[in-house]
Image: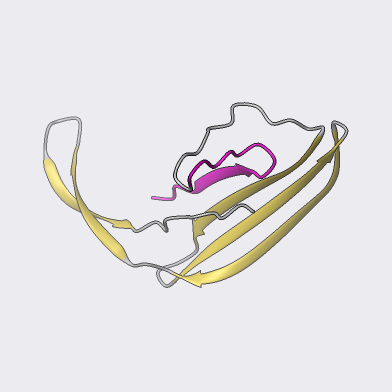
Amino acid sequence: MKKPITYFILSTLFVFVAGCNESEVKQISKEGAVETILNVDHLDDTHDIIVTTHKIWVKNELIKTTVHKDTIPTLGLSYQEAENSDGDKKTVPLKRDYELYITVK
């Protein structure tokens, strides 16, 4: 099952208070912002690909987009109980996803 993890980080709009509080951004200000998109996709049984995209916005215009791809080791499998429409339960393997932590300065 391929389910990419997508996080939008907007460095000019995040507000951190006391290192713990964060605010969720519904719409970015394109007057002057860096929009960062992180995506981790499962490539095969031993590798994942992390894709980092940066969009630079100045005066409501997209000035530049950069994309960086890197291959990283997979975290292996976890097992979860699943149920089909008939109510039958079965333990199925799922590829583990990375947790993403972002530091904005």
Q: Residue at x 12, y 32 (%)?
A: 87
Residue 55 spot, x, y in % from top left? 75, 46
Q: Residue at x 46, y 39 (%)?
A: 21
Name above or below for residue 88 compared with residue 47: above
Q: Residue at x 66, y 48 (%)?
A: 36
Which residue range is magenta in the image?
1-18
Q: Residue at x 14, y 47 (%)?
A: 90
Please check the rendered image and state whether residue 7 is part of the magenta-colored stretch, yes or no.
yes
Q: In screen coordinates, is 63 left or right of 95? A: right
Q: In screen coordinates, is 2 left or right of 103? A: left
Q: Quadrant of residue 26?
A: top right
Q: Nearer the viewer, residue 6 or 17?
A: 17
Q: Nearer the viewer, residue 24 or 73?
A: 24
Which residue is at the far left? 88
Q: In screen coordinates, is 94 left or right of 49? A: left
Q: Quadrant of residue 30?
A: top right
Q: Quadrant of the C terminus?
A: bottom right
Magenta span: helix, strand or loop, mainly?
Answer: loop
Q: In screen coordinates, is 81 left or right of 6? A: left
**Numbered disc total:** 0
Residue 64 spot, x, y in % from top left? 84, 49
Instruction: Report the colour scheme.
Output: secondary structure
Which residue is at the far front? 18
Residue 103 spot, x, y in % from top left? 56, 55
Please check the rendered image and state whether residue 86 is part of the magenta-colored stretch, yes or no.
no
